[in-house]
Image: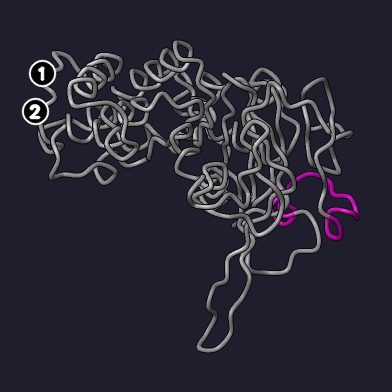
């Protein structure tokens, strides 16, 4: 068995298929995740990037066992949580938490900040009232909602989007989890708050040695926040490696297109034409024989592209790509 002492999360050939109704009587199988194997080391961040519908959120939910995979195995350290019974899931979820995308719908509008942050402690029966009050105070200090007494009595409608997301972060941290899934945590807050929230999460991760799965469509923030970047397309990981490899030396044509579409902060380049990923991704309910990106790929193609699904292969140290064209000139 592979050495796992430094692994927090490990997925082995995980598949997640859903049944979807097509017409009145027919159902079809939708392959949201189709054979993904990936690992996240303890205290590290893996960024999962890709277009909407690529399977990022589904993969995150699988690692939290909010979904049970159709096939394959999900490990938390050495514990196989794939078939974990409900009675044991509660103790697992004390160690694994989530920060959600929408700070407006992910917190209860009828609870004040203190009640929202304290709720996980009550659910898991942690501490007496005085101890819980101290823990809530510390969590609010960690996310810089100070003075804490003032914010404790506020309701969500009295907070900005950035402040609501800080409440969500405090709620996730209150149980002192070892693993957190952050699903597009800054996509629905104003631009001025995004950098602050990302910087805050990075500092808290370093402080508490938390393992993070950072789900985003923004490869630019992934470069800042992550130790490794995994690019997802059509339920598969098509490229994975350190940010300096994936961002500066991309190999998969999909990764290259994603990076070409990132706006540059240089005002002199404001009229520069941005790259786009032409075409539409394949329907995950359709039978696919070859590479899912084949119909959108503008590179010279191999015969295999239409008939076989490429698998991840190491190209450089710690840099893996799933593409039949990986050995050819990217230009």
Mark 2 surroundings within 10 Å by alpha-carbon count, few (fewer than 14), some (14 through 19), many (20 or more): few
Q: Please count the marks in the image.
A: 2
The residue that disc 1 covers is 149
Mark 1 surroundings within 10 Å by alpha-carbon count, few (fewer than 14), some (14 through 19), many (20 or more): few
Q: Quadrant of residue 246?
A: top right
- Residues at badges 1 and 2 in contact (C-beta under 8 Å)? yes
Q: Magenta span: helix, strand or loop, mainly? A: loop
Give the structural element (helix, strand or loop) at label 1. Answer: helix
- Mark pair 1, 2: CA separation: 7 Å
| Quadrant of the rendering where the C terminus is positioned | top right
* Relative side of 135 to 291, left or right: left
- Residue furthest to the bottom in view is 25
- Residue furthest to the front in view is 128
Residue shown at 13%/23% (left/top)?
151
Q: Would you say residue 99 is visible in this rendering?
A: yes
Provide the residue span drawn in magenta: 292-308
Check if residue 297 falls in the magenta segment.
yes
Q: Which mark is residue 153?
A: 2
Give the structural element (helix, strand or loop) at label 2. Answer: loop
């Amino acid at each position: 068995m592979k050495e796992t002492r430094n692994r927090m999360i490990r997925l082995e050939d995980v598949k997640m298929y859903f049944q979807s109704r097509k017409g009145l009587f027919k159902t079809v199988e939708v392959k949201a995740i189709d054979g993904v194997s990936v690992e996240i080391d303890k205290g590290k961040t893996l960024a999962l990037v890709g277009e909407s519908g690529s399977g990022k959120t589904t993969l995150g939910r699988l690692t939290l066992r909010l979904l049970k995979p159709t096939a394959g195995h999900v490990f938390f350290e050495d514990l196989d949580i794939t078939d974990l019974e409900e009675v044991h899931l509660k103790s697992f979820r004390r160690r694994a938490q989530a920060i959600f995308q929408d700070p407006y719908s992910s917190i209860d509008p009828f609870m004040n900040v203190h009640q929202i942050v304290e709720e996980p402690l009550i659910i898991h029966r942690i501490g007496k009232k005085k101890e819980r009050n101290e823990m809530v105070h510390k969590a609010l200090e960690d996310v810089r909602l100070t003075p804490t007494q003032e914010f404790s009595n506020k309701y969500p409608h009295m907070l900005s989007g950035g402040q609501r997301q800080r409440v969500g972060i405090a709620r996730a941290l209150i149980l002192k989890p070892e693993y957190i899934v952050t699903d597009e945590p800054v996509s629905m807050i104003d631009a001025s708050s995004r950098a602050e929230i990302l910087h805050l999460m990075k500092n808290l991760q370093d402080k508490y040695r938390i393992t993070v799965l950072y789900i985003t469509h923004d490869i630019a923030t992934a470069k800042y926040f992550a130790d490794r970047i995994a690019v997802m397309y059509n339920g598969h990981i098509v490229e994975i490696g350190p940010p300096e490899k994936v961002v500066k030396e991309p190999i998969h044509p999909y990764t290259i297109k994603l990076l070409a579409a990132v706006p540059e902060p240089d005002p002199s380049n404001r009229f520069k034409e941005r790259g786009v990923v032409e075409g539409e991704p394949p329907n995950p309910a359709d039978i696919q024989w070859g590479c899912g990106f084949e119909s959108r790929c503008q590179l010279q193609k191999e015969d295999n592209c239409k008939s076989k699904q490429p698998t991840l292969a190491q190209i450089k140290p710690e840099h893996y790509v799933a593409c039949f064209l990986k050995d050819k000139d990217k230009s």
